[in-house]
Image (cartoon, grey):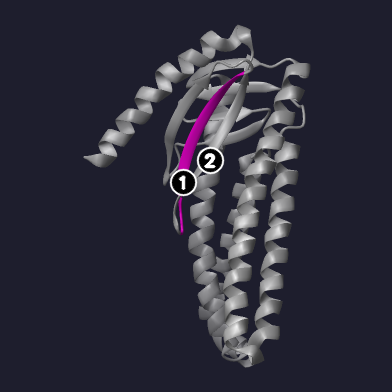
Amino acid sequence: MRSNPLIGAWISFGVAAAAAVWLVLQWVVRDDLFAALGYAMHAITLLAVFALIAGLAVVLLFLRFARVRADLLAGRNVIARWTVAAAEFEAFAARAVAADRADKRGALALVVGLVLLIFGAFALFDPEAAPAMLGMAGVVVLLMAGAYLLGGRVMRRQLEPASREVIVGTDGLMLNGVLHVWSAVLTWLAGVDLDQGPPATLQVTYAYLARFGPQYVTVMLPVPQSALPLARRVVGQLAPRRSRRSSGARS
């Protein structure tokens, strides 16, 4: 996340406020709403309940992100901080984008293959449904291809040279102005490792709980030779922290 999390907090608050207004209207002009919308009013009310709950939860999440971002920029709870030279950062960005593209291309090919296999099997089993099934497969493939292209674009934008600064703290980090947090609700630090290269890189992995289980994010940080002692300090402080959390989870 490169933008200020407070923007997301305000947007989420607006969604929650709109949902709350709709729920209040149920007591104020319920009959008028039913006359205008009919039974669709109940569906909108159900959506408003979910929007209110989710909106308030997201507000709290963005506020946590904003707090971690402010702490990092102010030097609070910061373990190490360094700036990467322009040429070195551009070389790092090129490697990172290429590696990300290769990983996503392999995942895309696997998923597309599975989709074509599954929908193709249904089409062969029921020839009358073949056009519809193959059409659905095409739509799914197009959506996944769009997500692949969008993900690559986001990655490239995040690595466009800006501050070229690396800030690593106890609760999160910032790379080139992009924020990563592992101290929010249902998120945790999963690993930290230093590859001394050359070129040296620091890899920080954190996870968050999603609908289908934990989702892992690995952030690669460029480490100039002059910043290697700082990177080792990060490993020395975050690795024991991660180990304590893992031991607590097992017990």
Considering the numbered disc 1 on the image, is that residue within a helix, a strand or a loop? strand
Which one is nearer the viewer's eye here, 16 or 62?
62
Report the amino acid beneath label 2.
Val
Q: Is residue 210 above or below residue 52?
A: above
Quarter in which the C terminus is drawn: top left
The residue type indicated by label 1 comes to Tyr
What residue is shown at x 59% (from left), y 70% (from top)?
A: 117
Q: Is residue 32 visible?
A: yes
Question: Would residue 13 be found to the left or right of residue 182 on screen?
Answer: right
User: Which residue bears the numbered disc 2?
Assistant: 217
**In this view, 45 is above or below 217:** below
Front in this rendered view, residue 197 or 203: 197
Q: Position of residue 214 (x, y in %)?
A: 44, 49
Q: Residue furthest left?
A: 251
Q: Which sits earlier in the primary sequence, circle 2 or circle 1?
A: 1
Label ID, residue 208: 1
Q: Quadrant of residue 98?
A: top right
The answer to whether mark 2 and mark 1 are in CB contact below 8 A is: yes
Q: Residue farthest to the front?
A: 124
Magenta region, residue range: 200-211
Q: Residue at x 61, y 83 (%)?
A: 124
Say if the magenta span includes residue 208.
yes
Q: Secondary structure at mark 2?
A: strand
Magenta stretch, overall SS = strand
Q: How many marks?
A: 2
